[in-house]
Amino acid sequence: SQQGEEDPQALSIQEGENATMNCSYKTSINNLQWYRQNSGRGLVHLILIRSNEREKHSGRLRVTLDTSKKSSSLLITASRAADTASYFCATVPSSNDYKLSFGAGTTVTVRA
Amino acid sequence: SQTIHQWPATLVQPVGSPLSLECTVEGTSNPNLYWYRQAAGRGLQLLFYSVGIGQISSEVPQNLSASRPQDRQFILSSKKLLLSDSGFYLCAWRLKGSRVNTEAFFGQGTRLTVV
């Protein structure tokens, strides 16, 4: 079963705007990760946030984690056309650190 | 540096035919290995993962099986394909052990169409 669920399913924004997507999960985790997938390709890791962290930044990416609400958000600032892709959250559960389960993803379209 | 190879990139197979998809990792040893399936426009479904040679954990009962005959080789198989087996199959690896806070590295995927 999928551990994470992203919201919204799809997002369309203008270049230069910020894009925010959310991820909710069901069980306690060791860490939560965000990935990006360009159409028809493999996934690329973007950022990892540990369960004891609340916020993390990487370039134009900002990730937050609220373990009490079992949710995370990914913010992409000053979006570019090249940011058009699908974004997935993935969780490593506390009960089994070998597993890595993904959500359904958010498809982001950045209009030039 | 580590690399992951997955082949073939595309495959069209008739219903009832066998399947063998192969994934190999270079530049690391004793990784965790994963097979995922992605239906069109959907998320990734974890099918199998392996923590070592011959050790396979199945997440979803289905028409598929996996094997890990060597440390860095992961194979996804089926004896008889169904139409519902169509999808985009992705192989991935992660470091294991005490380093639980590690990301996964993905192959480029195999697009399987069962006709």
Image (cartoon, coloured by chain):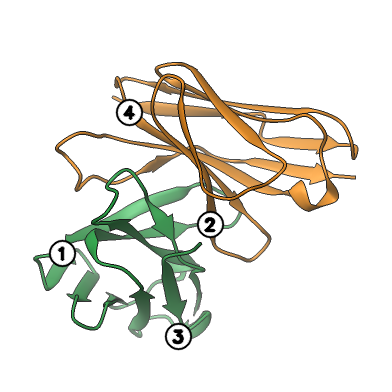
Q: Mark 2 falls within which chain?
A: B
Residue at position x 44%, y 66% in the image: A87
Q: Nearer the viewer, mark 4 or mark 3?
A: 4
Disc 1 to disc 4, C-alpha distance: 23 Å
Residue at position x 21%, y 72% in the image: A62
Q: Nearer the viewer, mark 2 or mark 3?
A: 2
Q: Amino acid at mark 1?
A: Ser
Query: To which residue does mark 1 refer?
Result: A51
Query: To which residue does mark 3 refer?
Result: A14
Q: Amino acid at mark 2?
A: Leu
Q: Which colour denotes chain A?
A: green
Task: Say few, some or many: other residues with alpha carbon within 10 Å of mark 3 (under 14 / 14 to 19 / 20 or more).
Answer: some
Q: Name the secondary structure under disc 4.
A: loop
Query: To which residue does mark 2 refer?
Result: B44
Q: Which colour denotes chain B?
A: orange
Q: Nearer the viewer, mark 1 or mark 3?
A: 1
Q: Name the secondary structure under disc 2.
A: strand
Q: Mark 1 falls within which chain?
A: A
Q: Amino acid at mark 4?
A: Pro
